[in-house]
Amino acid sequence: MTDRRNTPHIVVSGRLPPPMDGMSRVTALVLDRLRDRGPVEVADLSPGWNGGGLRYHAAKAMRVLLAGLRLAAGATIPGRRFYMPVDSGLGIFYTAALAGAARLFGYERTLHHHSFATISRPTWRMSLLTRLAGTDCMHVLLCPAMQARFQALYPAAKTAMSVSNAIFTPPVPRPRHGKSGPLRIGHLSNLCADKGLDTLFTLLRALRSEGVDVKLVLAGPGLGRMDNALVAAGLAAFDGDVEYHGPVDGDAKAAFYRDIDVFVFPTRYRNEAQPLVLFEAMAAGVPVLAYDRGCIGSDIPRPGLVPQERDFIQAVLPALRLWAKDRDALALASEQAHARARAAHEAGHSGMDALLDRIAGPLPEAAGTAVRPKRAMG
């Protein structure tokens, strides 16, 4: 029988699916792993859809109020722990309110950051959040560069650690085998201009004009009417050289990665942090070409990295030309991508173990060797 006096009282609060996005997915995965260690109370803040407006914020505010009452109800329970992903935009105020309440009621606090928006452009709202959360709050960032930048911008964030999203994407046992035929360029995301949808069609046109045998394979939902119209126009204009699979998950997503030769990600999204799709591609042995934003520069092999100031198409054309005609070179790039994914996944385990230990305490067999969280970087 479990001794409740030695079991932490854990409250997890944040947006859980639906809808499914990067942050809600990671929160759900962390929650699953915490439940493997013991009981967890959950305060789901998701109204069931993303967006804004009065109805959305009224529903969200009510859920935040209920989460605050849940924290208050546990104020006398020993071993109080609180975990929450940090919302972006106006959602920071919701995070700040609950982090402040958790501090008031004596919870150990862990906040998980998923966006570069308040790092690329420092904000008073994030400064307020870090002050309300307290200097003993653990801030979890996605890579060492993100951690260093965050702590430099927000002095109240005295305690921080890095946990890569690669932990959630185990590599396939063997890298993929190259195929003959057209070079298949893949892209999976919420399809929109911020993720480079227009750039993909321009890239396809440039390759076709050079006589490269190529196809563009798209997957994911269009975010708006204009995005869906652009996909439809591309399907009509490129005479069978564009395929669109729509939203994919599970086996359909795995089949998507098996079916492509290269993953291209010309993102211009200002909040880009650490896209899970890049780890998914490399874990399947698919080389990645991407703009250097957020943590991407430390996540993918350097030959596939395009500085933000460079023209993306001109930067990636040489590699795509080479891989289209030399499948041995493509196979080598595939092996390098797979090796990078394997190393990132293995390295991520120590960070995830430290995060889970922070929230739930070390597993009994690991109690003597728990990894200590990192303090502020000097």
Image (cartoon, rainbow, N blue to C red):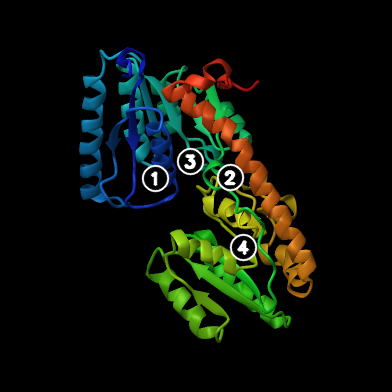
Whichever of callouts 3 and 1 sits on the residue coming sooner in the sequence is: 1
Looking at this view, name the residue that lies furthest to the bottom.
239
Whether pointer 1 and pointer 2 mark residues with C-beta atoms closer than 8 Å, the reply is no
Q: Cα distance, mark 1 to mark 2?
A: 19 Å
Q: Name the residue under label 1.
A: 24
- Given the image, on which type of amino acid does mark 4 rest? Val
At x 25%, y 31%, the residue is 67
At x 34%, y 52%, the residue is 19
Label annotation for residue 294: 2
- Given the image, on which type of amino acid does mark 2 rest? Gly
Whether pointer 2 and pointer 3 mark residues with C-beta atoms closer than 8 Å, the reply is no
Q: Cα distance, mark 3 to mark 1?
A: 10 Å
Q: Circle 3 — which element?
A: loop
**From the viewer's perspective, is the residue at label 3 or at label 1 nearer?**
1
At x 70%, y 68%, the residue is 178
Q: Is residue 158 visible?
A: no
Q: Alpha-carbon neighbours of circle 3 within 10 Å: few (<14), some, or many (≥20)?
A: many
Label annotation for residue 333: none
Q: Name the residue under label 3.
A: 114
Label annotation for residue 264: 4
Q: 326 or 45: which is nearer to us?
A: 326
The quarter of the picture where the N terminus appears is top left
Where does residue 127 sit, x and y in percent of width and height?
45, 28
Where does residue 71 sit, x and y in percent of width and height?
26, 23
Q: Is residue 224 visible?
A: yes
Q: Alpha-carbon neighbours of circle 1 within 10 Å: few (<14), some, or many (≥20)?
A: some
- Given the image, on which type of amino acid does mark 1 rest? Ser
